[in-house]
Amino acid sequence: MIQSMTGYGKHVVQLPSKKITIELKSLNSKNLDINARIPQTFREKELPLRKKIAAQLTRGKVDFSLYVEITGEETTAEVNAGVVKKYMEQLRQIADGDAVKLLELAMRMPDTMKTDKDDIDPEEYKSIELALEEALKAINTFRTEEGKVLESDFNDRLRTLGNLLDQVKMMDKERLGTIRERLEKAVVDLKVELDANRFEQELIYYLEKYDITEEKVRLANHLEYFENTLNSNDSNGKKLGFISQEIGREINTIGSKANFAPMQQLVVQMKDELEKIKEQMLNVL
């Protein structure tokens, strides 16, 4: 089953004097790109937290935010006034608001509290790890649900491509007959005498250049391979992307060999469906 790279996960832990909130947001990206927003107090733990995220989110542009809000008395902590004022100035430039509201928003930003404690409380950090695990579960659930929507869309478009290919197959015999008639008429219009056997040989050779039997077989195989990969246990967007490139190559070859307007119209429809698949493919994990 495929997964989307778009996702959102959040988890909140309430401690006796603190409220810990972890948010994860992800968008599509070729590789894993983690942007971490962590209070200065926990900077030393950024690397292990990143590793936990990387172990579960293999691709995507991921925004990881850790908020720690003081909700009770903590004698060792005090407001970092300079940082808060700077946040309020920046917020005031973005949107109007009264000082109290701006202060509330500013206090939720990183590094607004400073503390004399140099060491991270092990129990507090354990709570952060557990919150991250829950947020990761939430974002993976989100990605799976989004993947189901993508999978349904892909299956619909695969069926459409399969139907168009069936029409191409049915039309192929008529196409070759039309090309043959067109060539024979062109020779008659020249009003020259030709060796019938030689003309037939040349005609067969010419028609072989327009033969699309191999392309039809390969395209059918690629569509089946795409569907099998789509239904596999692992989500592999890169592999599906490679298969879609091969599908496009066969469609293009059929279009270049068609030399028959009704078939070329079918090819245009196939290209349109494939383009929509490729657009959605950018979001597959």
Image (cartoon, rainbow, N blue to C red):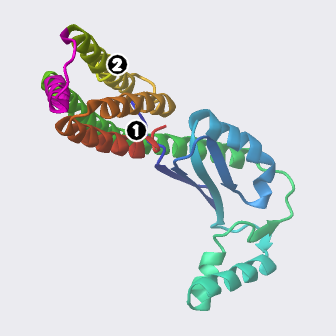
The span from disc 1 to disc 2 (Cα, nearest Å) is: 31 Å
Q: Is residue 166 above or below residue 90?
A: above
Q: Secondary structure at mark 1?
A: helix
Name the amino acid, label 2: Arg
Q: Is residue 120 magenta?
A: no
| Coordinates of residue 222 in the picture (x, y in percent) | 36, 22
Q: Which residues are magenta?
A: 176-196
Instruction: For label 2, count other residues whose C-alpha is less than 10 Å away and answer few (under 14), some (14-19) or many (20+).
Output: some
| Coordinates of residue 275 in the picture (x, y in percent) | 36, 44
Name the residue rendered at 71%, 57% in the picture.
38
Quick one: 27 or 227, which is closer to the camera? 227
Q: Which residue is mark 1?
A: 144
Instruction: For label 1, count other residues whose C-alpha is less than 10 Å away and answer few (under 14), some (14-19) or many (20+).
Output: many
Name the residue rendered at 82%, 65% in the picture.
115
Q: Is residue 135 above or below residue 91?
A: above
Q: Nearer the viewer, mark 1 or mark 2?
A: 2
Q: Secondary structure at mark 2?
A: helix
Name the residue rendered at 34%, 39% in the picture.
274
Name the residue rendered at 53%, 50% in the picture.
26
| Left or right of 189, for residue 26 | right
Which of the two labelled residues, at mark 1 and mark 2, occupies the earlier sequence position? 1
Q: Which residue is mark 2?
A: 218
Q: State the count of labels.
A: 2
| Coordinates of residue 6 in the picture (x, y in percent) | 47, 48
Q: Is residue 150 visible to the viewer in this orientation of the structure? A: yes
